[in-house]
Image (tube, coloured by chain):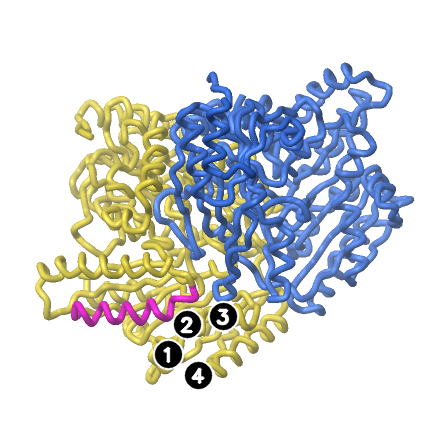
Chain colours: A blue, B yellow
Amino acid sequence: MKYNPVTHAIVEKLKEICGENYVFTDPEKLEPYSHDETPAEQFSHLPEVVVMPIKTEQISQIMKLANKNKIPVTPRGAGSGLSGGAIPVCGGIIVSLEKMNKILEIDTQNMMVTLEPGVITNEVNEKIEELGLFFAGYPMSVETCFIGGNLAENAGGGRAVKYGVTDRYIMGIEVVLPDGEIITLGGKRVKDVTGYNLKQLFIGSEGTLGIITRVIIKLLPLPSAKVDLLVLFKDIKQAISLVPKIMTETRIIPTSIEFMDQLSVQSSCEYLNEHLPYQDAGAMLLIEVDGNSQKEVEREAEIIGELCLKHNALEVYVADNYTTQERVWAVRRNIAEAFKVVSPQQSLEDIVVPISVIAEVVEEIQAIAKKYDILIPCYGHAGDGNLHATLVKNPDHSYQKWLEIEHGVLMDLYRLVKAKGGTISGEHGIGSKRKDYLSMVCSETEIKVMKKIKEAIDPNNIMNPGKIFK
Amino acid sequence: MKYNPVTHAIVEKLKEICGENYVFTDPEKLEPYSHDETPAEQFSHLPEVVVMPIKTEQISQIMKLANKNKIPVTPRGAGSGLSGGAIPVCGGIIVSLEKMNKILEIDTQNMMVTLEPGVITNEVNEKIEELGLFFAGYPMSVETCFIGGNLAENAGGGRAVKYGVTDRYIMGIEVVLPDGEIITLGGKRVKDVTGYNLKQLFIGSEGTLGIITRVIIKLLPLPSAKVDLLVLFKDIKQAISLVPKIMTETRIIPTSIEFMDQLSVQSSCEYLNEHLPYQDAGAMLLIEVDGNSQKEVEREAEIIGELCLKHNALEVYVADNYTTQERVWAVRRNIAEAFKVVSPQQSLEDIVVPISVIAEVVEEIQAIAKKYDILIPCYGHAGDGNLHATLVKNPDHSYQKWLEIEHGVLMDLYRLVKAKGGTISGEHGIGSKRKDYLSMVCSETEIKVMKKIKEAIDPNNIMNPGKIFK
């Protein structure tokens, strides 16, 4: 597919649509839009122009213009993605949703909010907290990520064990299609089987089928009580093999079961200048239980704590107040940032496997690390079988060697994941980072069906090209 | 689209594929496959042949044969659908899944079951109950419906307020495509963002995109405690206007909030020879709360009961033992059956609206009933805004008049629903029953996108044709 360049005439037309002050072509203004949070330089690419529409109709006109002129368009939220989804790898137009950042409605009767895509996720929860409500489907990057990006990637996060991921809470969306037409899917109704589930098709399609311009989200009553347990283990295997048991033996579904190995905890603690009691521990689980009765939540936490001690936990620390809970969770949330400081040459992975096999998968990952003489610290959402194995360059290796090794490690890792019934991304997406590996976990037929759908909706392939598919 | 007939040669080939004893062409054997549970004769249509494959590979061969020869294929589960989805309206081949009825695996480690599509839904829950697990996504017809049909329709049910509907629990599916290719989507993993969410596209596609041949379902720990409240009100409005308040004022999400008007309760009680204390009540709510602590569940039921009494409930009956709970729920579950006895000329509707407006919608439905001089009793899943308004022929009207009236009532009803932000089906599907009305609630663009997807996956339109689209 050959694309046309963004000519001066196209830029002028974009200015007519969005206004002069909302269209940028200066190289220094374009640079921040050339990458996301994927920690690797090889994925970056400059757009030719960045536009910042403030309403759906403008986006419709932009898409009509781009479609007619065969110019690639990449929608972009906060740029906090981890698979290169918002990077304009074919150049063209970036449609930044940062100016479409209004909370349009808080509907307490239906317990729903209507948002523009550029709203920062945390902003919603802060606004509705006083109403005793919350949005349960948010990812770890809650302080920076935009709602629109969460939908585009179907973001996961740390509460998915109990609450599921983003898509569970999305009741309705408005989307601008590649040809500029606007559709509204779903609405303020919690059941809907009217034709195909197009809403779910657009969610998680990584901006390759259209631009989400409005979102209706279902809220839940905010649980009034929660307890966090920080559980220390001698080694990784003991920690991780306990994960399925927590649910099968206690029959309690915790809000979160997060896993951190020693290196993850150390790095994050150093980064934050924090001191957790991690000295002797080879691994930790961070387990949260929530509910509407403090007593009941404490009872459940106690049952889980006892199970942990029965299964060789070194220590169970209880965090039952806000300050301590925040401290512990900050360590977990900042691991990725901390690793970036340790080494900018790394590959943050996002594998997911059946929870029954996570213990053996973590063991085999350590064998892969040994084989290539690199470190692969692990942390992540163990309760979902979703682990952020992070390939970190050996400081003794050259950059060239790292690039060679990286591919080999990823092949080994993805082969392992496939063999164990897992897949290569649980929440970060395929984007440009993993598109060469999609065929390792999806069959030829599955990819063929996906491509047929892409072609049916975007025949000119202008909508975020170079993502998902090779 | 012209289809070819099922010739003698085709029947012979089907016998080669499935074996002589699994292919039927006798008219009396075909008759039961000419209708589902949609209560109206005008929807029935005979197939030309019924085949009963026992494995996926046979279905693949059937589809290849049908696709090559342009013969329509209609997949069929238990035939308990309520929108004509399993009726072969273009003739051709019925692929009945009734012989593919094995529970293939119960995986307690991952809390998942793997099933063939012909398994009866209740069978699963009975098998796993002793393991302390349950499948939370099942519909009211749990004693007859097949798992495959639940997926095809994305069945809802009475527990959706808390637990959501079928699709939330479907981790993986195997599907035979219209061209006979077999794909596996998802697997034993609770997070997965590897490419487009094809799994969700097939779920609820009413058998028009492929035949689901295997299903992996996520289970939950069976709650150890539940309490049902049967709450009596003077009139419909008082009952239904309380529904959103239960969630917004108590911040408790009950398992179920079911609504029954007087006629529904009376009819079902007479049908079952049951006696509920309904004499003075114009309407009832049946509210269920469940959890893992009897005390906590009782506390929540008490809070809800008090709210009901504060808002004019005549009486709150507590059903806290299995026998009483079963009696009350049997009345709710048998309303549809009871109405069929009252009048075979009826239209069982499945509208869904935002819960904030259900009270006014129910009022306006009564105005529509008055306008056409018929009865429209209402019952259903009020907690989801999902109401089974049932148009019942006035015994004084001729059958011809009923047919004329029916269309007018449906137009008025669907216009009302659309105006209130709702849609025409919450759980029964579009099928052949509602396809002429799809454009009343879906935009031209939305239908166009659905059709493009249908054409991309089934270019010969042989897969359950005559459903969803006009």
- Up-down relation of residue A56 to residue B336 (above or below): above
Q: Amino acid at mark 4?
A: Asn
Q: What stretch of residues is rendered in magenta? A: B355-373
**Number of numbered discs visible in the structure rendering:** 4
User: In this orientation, does residue B212 appear?
Assistant: yes
Q: Which residue is mark 1?
A: B276
Q: Which residue is mark 4?
A: B312
Q: Main secondary structure of the magenta part?
A: helix
Q: Amino acid at mark 2?
A: Val
Q: Amino acid at mark 3?
A: Tyr
Residue occupying image coordinates x 44% and y 57%: A188
- In what quadrant of the picture does the N terminus of chain B appear? top left
Is the residue at mark 4 from the same chain as the one at mark 1?
yes
User: In this orientation, does residue B148 appear?
Assistant: no
Of mark 2 and mark 1, the one earlier in the sequence is: 1
Element on which disc 2 rests: helix
Of mark 1 and mark 3, the one earlier in the sequence is: 1
For this rendering, which residue is in front, B95 or A432?
Answer: A432
Q: Amino acid at mark 1?
A: Leu
Q: Is residue A139 left or right of residue A176?
A: right
Of mark 3 and mark 2, the one earlier in the sequence is: 3
Q: Which residue is mark 3?
A: B322
- Up-down relation of residue B273 to residue B458 (above or below): below
Q: Are marks 2 and 1 in contact (CB under 8 Å)?
A: yes
Q: Position of residue A200 (x, y in %)?
A: 47, 43
Q: Which residue is mark 2?
A: B328
Q: Are marks 4 and 1 in contact (CB under 8 Å)?
A: no
Of mark 4 and mark 1, the one earlier in the sequence is: 1
Residue occupying image coordinates x 63% and y 54%: A123
